Amino acid sequence: MTTVVSAQDHIRQDVMVISLVGLAHGISHFFHMILAPLFPWIKEAFSLSFAELGLLMTVFFVISGIGQALSGFVVDKVGARAVLFFGISCLGVSALVLSSAQNYAMLLVGSGLAGVGNSVFHPSDYTLLNKKVSSQRLGYAFSVHGVTGNLGWAAAPVFLVTIAGMTTWRTALFCAAFLPFVVLAILFVFRDLLHTEVSHRAASIDAGKVKEGTTDFMRIPAVWMCFGFFFMTAIALGGIQSFSSASLRQMYEMSLESATTAYTLYMLASAAGMLWGGYLAARSTQHDRTITIAFGCAGVLSLVLASGAANAILAIVLMAGIGFGAGVAGPSRDLLIRAAAPKNATGRVYGIVYSGLDSGLAVAPLIFGAIMDAHHPSWLFVCVGFFQVMAILTAVNVGSKTRKLAV
């Protein structure tokens, strides 16, 4: 009887930890989109070009990328919970700054502050999941983690555009500022579940494996291939996040509402894909093959969309298909990284690897902003397909290296 109760308690703890970390991840992804849905209003209010709008996103992700690489070391040193709480607080303050911006410089400051807040999430989240969730449920944990992130991406345009349409873009940002503080309050109530022991003797215990110190993991080639994978996929994602609505409106003469719907369906389909991808990842060790099939299909659909051969309704369906393919790859991607990461460097590895995500999202707005300013909206989807195919090559490389190490 005691064993049954203990097992049930363990399952309950896993579910709670996965839910709390997922909630935090959702709000971080919501803030990835804190400005892009409001670009039509901000562009007019400050007379900005697409390139200047893209720079706002670049500042966010450059700061987030640098901070993410550094925060992984902090997480391993002081624990994931405190770092996570700091990041969520920064997001709330950033929205307040953005809502009161009187010039472009203030927008840059607010975007940078949001980048600081965003930088902590992946090292903190994955450290918590790897340390607090049973290994047999990690595939599902990574799936839920990805789904909540995509739901945050999907919710942001609906939330912000709806409020901005009814009131002003400043009011939309002001309302968004309350969301991180609500999430922070919930996490604080259940803070004991998010506590992780920090071992200061980890290096000495594993001295035979990590004599060189805390940066020894950076010599592992698979870690940098994972970084490259995230960099490629993030450029594709950044193009869709920042300018897919504008591109669809120009190519298919959609209304702003229809283009926003296409993007929202992309994110919802991606979330659905992650649920299916979690099921596949839990039952397979060939994660690179799952990624190859998923991104291969998504890349083909991107090229079809770029051709302009579809009508407006089919274009929305194609956006959903691209999102589903990208979502299926998500859980396999996270397990691929886990296989490449030394056990005593979880936060650092996820910090470095996920800084590839921020690096790609920083570059993407500049690339796609220039494309949109040059009046080539179809090129956006051509580039999306190209970078998804490039990501396949890095995934296959990582998969082959980790399989060799496992033999």
Image (cartoon, rainbow, N blue to C red):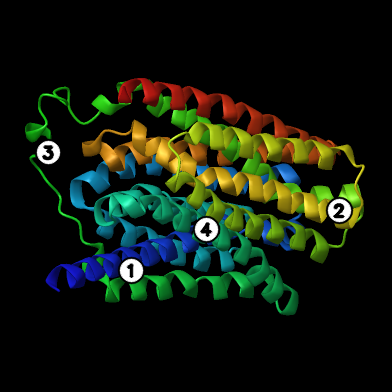
Q: Earlier in the sequence, mark 3 or mark 1?
A: 1
Q: Which amino acid does label 3 sit on?
A: Ala
- Horizontal placement of 392 versus 129: left or right? right
Picture residue at 59% right of the left edge, 69% below the top: 173
Q: Mark 1 and mark 4 in contact (Cβ < 8 Å)?
A: no
Q: Earlier in the sequence, mark 4 or mark 1?
A: 1
Q: Which amino acid does label 4 sit on?
A: Val
Residue picked out by circle 1:
16
- Horizontal placement of 259 versus 119: left or right? right
Q: Which of marks 3 and 4 is nearer the N terminus?
A: 4
Residue 89 visible, this angle:
no
Residue picked out by circle 3:
202
Between the residue at mark 3 and the residue at mark 4, the CA separation in whole angstroms equals: 33 Å
The percent position of residue 84, horizontal first and vertical second, equals 33, 58
**Disc 1 secondary structure class:** helix
As rendered, which of 91 and 407 lies closer to the eye?
Answer: 407
**Disc 4 secondary structure class:** helix
- Horizontal placement of 295 versus 399: left or right? right
Q: Which amino acid does label 2 sit on?
A: Leu
Q: What residue type is labelled 1?
A: Met
Residue picked out by circle 2:
314
**Disc 2 secondary structure class:** helix
